[in-house]
Image (cartoon, rainbow, N blue to C red):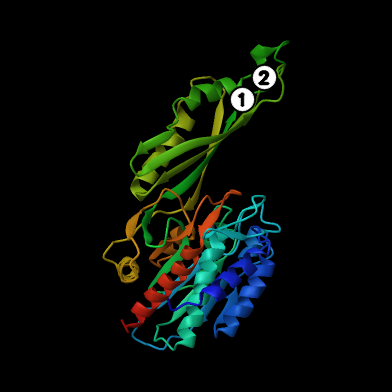
Amino acid sequence: MQINKERVLQEFFELISIPCLSKNERQVADLLTKRLEELGGTVTEDQANKVLGGNTGNLVANFKGTVATAPKIMVSAHMDCVAPCDNIKPQIVDGVIKSDGTTILGGDDKGGVVAILETLRVLKEKNIPHGDIQVVFSVCEEQGVAGAKNIDKSLIGADFGYSLDSSGRPGKIINAAPGQNKIFAKIHGKTSHGGVSPEKGINAIKAAGEIIVKVPSGRIDEETTCNMGIINGGRATNIVPDLVEIACDARSRNQAKLDNLTKTIVDAFENSCTMEGVRVEVEVVPSYGSYLLDNASSCISLAQKAAERLGLPVNIGGTGGGSDANHYNNFGIPTTVLGTGMTNVHTCDEILLEEDLYVTAEWLLEILTEAGGTK
Ligand SMILES: [Zn+2]
């Protein structure tokens, strides 16, 4: 291996020891800014936090390449993590890194962060020829991928990119992810005393019942799903409820199917109630668009070649979840997500194989070396 394992492990432990909830990434961001600058990067922090209500913006760092003809590559990971992440005490048992069971580990996504830092360090130390590199460390990924969604687009630009933020062992390459719309419906009835004058009311819960069975939910096809996830309504057993609120999530890896499904859901909300006087308001909030990358694209093929050279099992496929990469793809930077080995994320059982921590860094280094044209 070209990377320095001891340094990677130490930096990983250092980074996960800093609490870094979404909207509260300041301490980690300051440390990363310092590291990126020490490595020769020009770092800019955007103002996404002004929209998001956090204390930190996305970090974008640019590193000048030594090979003018090489593609410019973006590498990204997110800084924030989910709770509980205070006082993480990592331990290594039989090659497996885990917390003491009272917190998450934080491999999601500090495993990606340290891979990026180590890659930059080794490129510099060993004078490995490379093209321009843009590093993006995002905020609020764990809150509806909101950091990348609100990134200052004038700061980002690359021929293609790699987001180090997927479960699955190094060698896993994501070539497709769904787009997602959230659909919020308000079903309005009319309130009245349920015992004294029910005929004066319009029961929004009854109306919702009639509507709900007509709204699609579940798996629609291989690449399309929707889920009615939240329902709220009613105040007391003796009050005719005048409002029910419902929220749904629609996803598809095919944008046309997502558009169609969204239309069907909206239509079902708006038109399936036969009760008089019921009013329905529907709002569609697009979260992110889908993407589908060609396996022959430079982005995928470079990652594949590098993985093969390292003897990693290559596994190219789609995912059912969205990530920062959805936004980068939507902004015109073809970006794949790479497996970093993170396992059982968002739970106190999160683990990461020590080997995967190193192999992820080695893989990214191999990709950037390959792109630099010396292999
Ligand atoms: Zn993540």
Task: Tell me the SS state at disc 2.
Answer: loop
Q: Which mark is residue 23?
A: none
Answer yes or no: is residue 240 visible.
yes
Q: Crowding at label 1, few (<14), some or many (≥20) Cα neighbours within 10 Å? A: many
At 30% across and 70% down in the image, what residue appears? Answer: 305
Find residue 199 and report its image quarter. top right
Return the residue found at the far top.
Answer: 196
**Ligand 1 is within 8 Å of the C-beta of the residue at disc 1:** no
- Residue 32 lies left or right of residue 222; in this view the side is right
**In the rendered image, which residue does mark 1 sit on?**
189
Among the two numbered marks 1 and 2 on one chain, the one whose residue lies closer to the N terminus: 1
CA–CA distance between discs 1 and 2?
9 Å
Amino acid marked by disc 2: Val
For this rendering, which residue is in front, 206 or 147?
Answer: 147
Q: How many marks?
A: 2
Q: Position of residue 74 (x, y in %)?
A: 45, 72
**In the rendered image, which residue does mark 2 sit on?**
240
Find residue 7 and report its image quarter. bottom right
Which circle, 1 or 2, is nearer the viewer?
2
Q: Position of residue 277 (x, y in %)?
A: 57, 23
Q: Are marks 1 and 2 in contact (CB under 8 Å)?
A: yes
Q: Crowding at label 2, few (<14), some or many (≥20) Cα neighbours within 10 Å? A: many
